[in-house]
C-alpha cells in the first residue's frame, strides 16, 4: 500500500484490509469539508478512523462546547451524540449544525424532562438547578446553569450556596458530593455504559494486571470510582495519561477512548475492559459523508428553549 499519512496515524489499531474499506470515505469527507467550509467536532468516544481520520476538533463535552463557540466555519458537523450537537447549535446560532444520525441519543439525556425539574423546584424552593450537559436543550432551558464532568465541582462551588440540585446523573452527583461541602440533591439518571462497571471487576483487573493505573469516569458508580487511582472527564483522563505516562493503564469508560489515546501514547500498555456506547457508535464514516453531501440532518432548537438554554451553557463557560 502506498504511504498514506492518515492511515499512518491509525495503523496500530486498524488493520490494512479494514482501512481499504474506509479510505474512499475518508478522502471524500476531506474534500466535502473544504467544499462546505465545514469542521468536524468529534467526542473522545468516536472510533479512531473518525477521531484521527477526519475530525478537526476532538475532546470531552466541555472542550467541544468551548471550541464550537470559537469556530468560524459555516458548517459544524458533530460526530457525537444529539445533546452535543444541540450544544454546538446553542453556541453557534447562525451556523448550520449537522448530526449524521439523529438517533444518537444518551440514556442520561433521556432520563429527565422539564416537567421533572418543575417538580424538583417545587420540592426544593430556591435551590439552584445544575444540569449536566448530557441533557436536552429543553432541560437546559429549565435549569440555572450547566456543568460537565470536567467542571462539575467548580460549577457547584461557584454558586456560593449551601445546597444545589444536580441532575440527571446520580453517580456524578454522588462522586462530586464526596469532594465538596455543598449538599447535592441528585436525580436517578444513569449512563448505560458506565453503570455496568463494578467494583469487583476493578479489583479483578488489578490482580490480573499488576501495577496497572486505573482511571475511572465520574459517571461510574461511586464504589467503582473508590477503587480507581484517579477520576476525571474523558479529557482529564487523556491529560493524566499523556502527562504521567504510566507504563500500564486501564480507562474505566467507553472503549474507543483507549484506542484513540493509545495512538498518542505508543509506549503505554492499555488494558481494555470494554463497554461500548451504542449511541456514539451510530456515527460512522458513511453517515458523516452522507450528512456533508446532503446537508442533513440539521439541528434545530425550539425557539422557546433557545435563549434560556444558551444562558445556562454560557453561565457554565464563564466559570473558571
Ligand atoms: P466527557 O464530558 O467526560 O467527555 O463525558 C461525556 C460523556 O458522555 C461521557 O459518557
Ligand atoms: Fe450518554 Fe453514557 Fe453514551 Fe456518554 S457514554 S453518551 S453518558 S449513554
Image: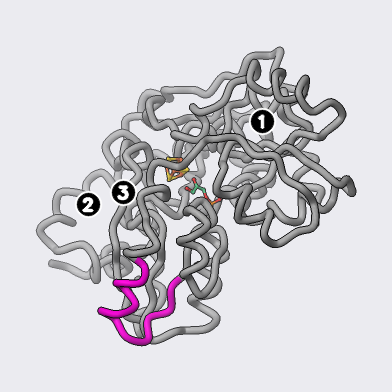
Q: Position of residue 185 (x, y in %)?
A: 70, 39
Q: Nearer the viewer, mark 2 or mark 3?
A: 3
Q: Are marks 2 and 3 in contact (CB under 8 Å)?
A: no
The residue under label 1 is 90
Query: Where does the magenta region start and end?
Result: 202-214
Query: Alpha-carbon distance for marks 1 and 2?
Result: 33 Å
User: Which quadrant is the N terminus positioned in?
Assistant: bottom left
Please tell me which of labels 2 and 3 falls first in the chain.
Answer: 2
Q: Please, what secondary structure does the residue beneath circle 3 have? A: loop
Q: Residue at x 62, y 25 (%)?
A: 137
Q: Position of residue 242 (x, y in %)?
A: 50, 77
Q: Please, what secondary structure does the residue beneath circle 2 have? A: helix
Q: Nearer the viewer, mark 1 or mark 3?
A: 3
The residue under label 3 is 276
Q: Nearer the viewer, mark 1 or mark 2?
A: 1
User: Which quadrant is the C terminus positioned in?
Assistant: bottom right
The mark total stands at 3
Query: Within the magenta stretch, is there residue 209?
Result: yes
Query: Alpha-carbon distance for marks 1 and 3?
Result: 28 Å
Amino acid at each position: 500500500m502506498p504511504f498514506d499519512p492518515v492511515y499512518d496515524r491509525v495503523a496500530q489499531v486498524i488493520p490494512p484490509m479494514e482501512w481499504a474499506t474506509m479510505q474512499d470515505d475518508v478522502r471524500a469527507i476531506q474534500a466535502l469539508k473544504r467544499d462546505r467550509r465545514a469542521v468536524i467536532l468529534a467526542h473522545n468516544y468516536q472510533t479512531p478512523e473518525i477521531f484521527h481520520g477526519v475530525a478537526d476538533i476532538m475532546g470531552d463535552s466541555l472542550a467541544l462546547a468551548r471550541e464550537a463557540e470559537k469556530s468560524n466555519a459555516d458548517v459544524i458537523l458533530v460526530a457525537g451524540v444529539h445533546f452535543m450537537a444541540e450544544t454546538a447549535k446553542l453556541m453557534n446560532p447562525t451556523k448550520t449544525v449537522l448530526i449524521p444520525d439523529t438517533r444518537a441519543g444518551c440514556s442520561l439525556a433521556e432520563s429527565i424532562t422539564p416537567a421533572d425539574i418543575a417538580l424538583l423546584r417545587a420540592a426544593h424552593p430556591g435551590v439552584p438547578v445544575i444540569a449536566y450537559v448530557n441533557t436536552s436543550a429543553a432541560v437546559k432551558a429549565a435549569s440555572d446553569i450547566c456543568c460537565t464532568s470536567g467542571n462539575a465541582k467548580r460549577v457547584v462551588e461557584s454558586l456560593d450556596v449551601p445546597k444545589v440540585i444536580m441532575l440527571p446523573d446520580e453517580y456524578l452527583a454522588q462522586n462530586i458530593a464526596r469532594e465538596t461541602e455543598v449538599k447535592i440533591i441528585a436525580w436517578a439518571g444513569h449512563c448505560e455504559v458506565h453503570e455496568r462497571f463494578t467494583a469487583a471487576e476493578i479489583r479483578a483487573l488489578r490482580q490480573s494486571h499488576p501495577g496497572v493505573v486505573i482511571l475511572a469516569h465520574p459517571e461510574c458508580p461511586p464504589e467503582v470510582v473508590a477503587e480507581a487511582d484517579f477520576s476525571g472527564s474523558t479529557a482529564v483522563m487523556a491529560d493524566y495519561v499523556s502527562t504521567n505516562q504510566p507504563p500500564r493503564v486501564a480507562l474505566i469508560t467507553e472503549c474507543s477512548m483507549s484506542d484513540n489515546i493509545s495512538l498518542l501514547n505508543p509506549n503505554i500498555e492499555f488494558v481494555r475492559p470494554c463497554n461500548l456506547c451504542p449511541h456514539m457508535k451510530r456515527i460512522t464514516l458513511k453517515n458523516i459523508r452522507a450528512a456533508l453531501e446532503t446537508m442533513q440532518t440539521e439541528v434545530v432548537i425550539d425557539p422557546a428553549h433557545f435563549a434560556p438554554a444558551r444562558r445556562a451553557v454560557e453561565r457554565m463557560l464563564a466559570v473558571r
